Image: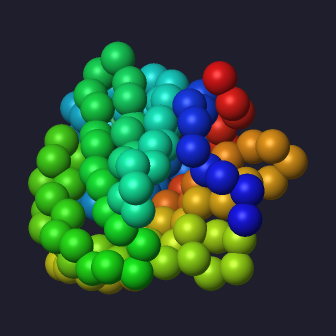
Amino acid sequence: PVSLCGSWDMVSNVNFEGYMIALGISLYTRKIALKIKHRKVIEQVGDRYVVKTLSTFRNYTFSFRVNEEFQEFTKGLDDRNCKSLVAWEGNKLVCIQKGEKKNRGWAHWIEDDKLHLELHCEDQVCKQVFKRV
Ligand code: RET
């Protein structure tokens, strides 16, 4: 598939609020998080991916190997521990985040030169689109 690597700037963000509420993120953090644009920086170092979500408010970075379960602590988001697993499903890079929250995970793919990210938790789905910087 097309490489996800590079720097990407947010162009749209649908139902981020619903997703954050499902995660139990505080009103204070939600108010700020809703107003800011995120930049996604995806790097590949050997067989390891590093994904950075950068903003003027807070950053969140994690890294993983595809098909290898890892311990994820969602520091600065909802501060939970997950057992996460990322795998390719066709052209989508799909993550399942097992933990306290049901049906939690995300998927990344490229469509029309844009980076798409769908985040889900419980019954909420957030859809984000990014363009190359
Ligand atoms: C920000 C700002 C502080 C509050 C919240 C944030 C959410 C970040 C999220 C990042 C997800 C990244 C994923 C990347 C996959 O490749 C923007 C750090 C809640 C939800 C899943």
Q: State left or right for residue 121 relative to residue 117.
A: left
From what the image shows, is residue 115 above or below residue 38? below
Q: Residue at x 20, y 64 (%)?
A: 72
Give the farthest residue toward the right: 112
Q: Residue at x 30, y 55 (%)?
A: 63
User: Where is residue 36 drawn, in percent x and y?
Assistant: 45, 23
User: Where is residue 123 drawn, in percent x and y?
Assistant: 47, 75
Q: Which quadrant of the figure shows ligand 1?
A: top left
Scheme of colours in the image: rainbow
Q: Residue at x 71, y 71 (%)?
A: 91
User: Where is residue 97 drawn, in percent x and y?
Assistant: 32, 75
Would residue 72 be seen by someone viewing this image from the given angle? yes
Q: Which quadrant is the N terminus positioned in? A: bottom right
Q: Which quadrant is the C terminus positioned in? A: top right
Q: Residue at x 16, y 70 (%)?
A: 71
From what the image shows, is residue 46 above or below residue 5? below
Would residue 122 be seen by someone viewing this image from the given angle? no
User: Where is residue 23 drawn, in percent x and y?
Assistant: 29, 60
Give the farthest residue toward the top: 56
